Amino acid sequence: MILSIGSLLGLGMHEGRTDPRPSWGLWALIAVMALFFVSMKEIVWAFLALWSTFAMAAPALAHRSKDRIVPAGASLLVVIPMLIFAFALLIGADPAPDGAWENLLATIAYYSVSFLTFLSICVGTSIRLNWALLTWSVVFLAFTLCATAIILQFTSDYYLGTTYLNNENQAAMVQLSWAYFGCIGIGFAVKRFGRGALSIYQPYWKKPTEGKA
Amino acid sequence: MKRDGLSEFIAFLVTIFLLVLVAMEAFDRGFYYSAGSAIACMFLAAIPIIFRHHRLITFPFWMAAWYFFLLWLHSFGILHDYYGRIDWFDELTHTMAIGLAASVIFLLLILLNQHARSVRLPPLTYPLFMVIFAMGLGVTWEVLEFILDVTINTPMQYSLADSVSDMMTDLGGGLLAASACLIYLLYLDPDQISDALQADRLIKRYQRKYHHGQ
């Protein structure tokens, strides 16, 4: 399984160069899913899909070059949990909102969206990171995304009369705790076991040193 | 810098004195949670002094003074139930604490950018890192509060509105500090800031860990 994920990560990369076509295809898919989640009033997933759509397009927009986009393999990491959730919604298999499986899927999505965002920043700027800073930045951005999603749910409940959190502190804190411990766990696992597979993207965050001591 | 060290030490002693007063009053009134909190703050107040003494990092005086004031304000607020009685008190302490945390992160980012071979952070990316790391600390605090409330029944989280408001002020405090630090960078050279921090030992430790064998 790890091997197949590893080979998927290389999608859209040829000899260290990014082929932008599959990336833009996946960008369109994420944008469509964002619209789908909005129509289904799944606020957390709509937020994550909209965030990813913007994060992926930002470097291309900033540099006015369609080639400035994250590799398709990295986008796939975001697409997979979103597709699973969208499929579950379509077949009506969402029996317990905020249940364990949804929280687990959301935790994976927070982490992968966060990773995609950092990769996008690396593609769009001259930033250079080491593994430790990259790992912890991704984990902390995932916390921030989860906190923002909770703020959005609360605001929607307060102003629009929705019932995402039902005014229950426990509902929000369970979501936050899943994301917190889950993302730390994924961060450690990636640092320990995923470095080999993810090193395919290393040129994006470890650029030539340009004479820095 | 020596004068800063003396000012910091005097500010530390004044803070300890004020915290002792808070702890004594709390014991006198039988508020043991408040007393425990004041005693914990006394230990926490020593952090900048210890860091300076061991030449790990020397925080600017304004930052240390902000930290001491915050510790006293928090203890005093618990003793007099300002967190329950004054609507904006929690928001005030959260914004100040996260603003301070984001400022410390800003200094660490400057050190990292100046001394780590494998890291280059364009100044415009500082706000991003400041906000996400500050927000991450805020989230850590909320999760810790939730765990303590569930396990040992502490009264740390009042309601959903309180928790969400904490996270919103964390975000606001992080953004505020990020904007302030960008302005700070316009007037001060990162090299000067890095030198003033006197973080020789911290840098050596980092380089031993991450640059070993390069």
Image: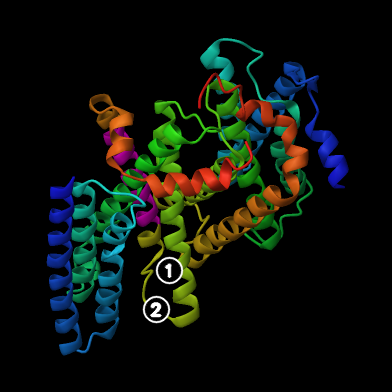
Judge left or right: residue A137 versus residue A85: left
Name the element at disc 2.
loop
| Residue B203 in view (yes/no) | yes
Asked if residue B174 lies in the magenta stretch, the reply is yes
Q: Main secondary structure of the magenta part?
A: helix
Residue range in magenta is B164-181
Residue occupied by mark 2: B154
Which image quarter: residue B54? bottom left
Q: Residue flagged by tag 2: what amino acid is it? A: Thr
Q: How is the image coloured?
A: rainbow
Task: Give the answer, above or below, for where A38 lies relative to A15.
Answer: below
Residue B68 horizontal side relative to residue B193, left or right: left
Task: Give the residue furthest to the front.
Answer: B213
Looking at the rendered structure, the secondary structure element under dot 1 is: helix
Please tell me which residue lies in front, B190 or B40.
B190
The residue at which mark 1 appears reads as: B145
Q: Circles 1 and 2: CB distance less than 8 Å?
A: yes
Residue at 26%, 24% (x, y): give it.
B186
Foreground residue among A56 and A85: A56
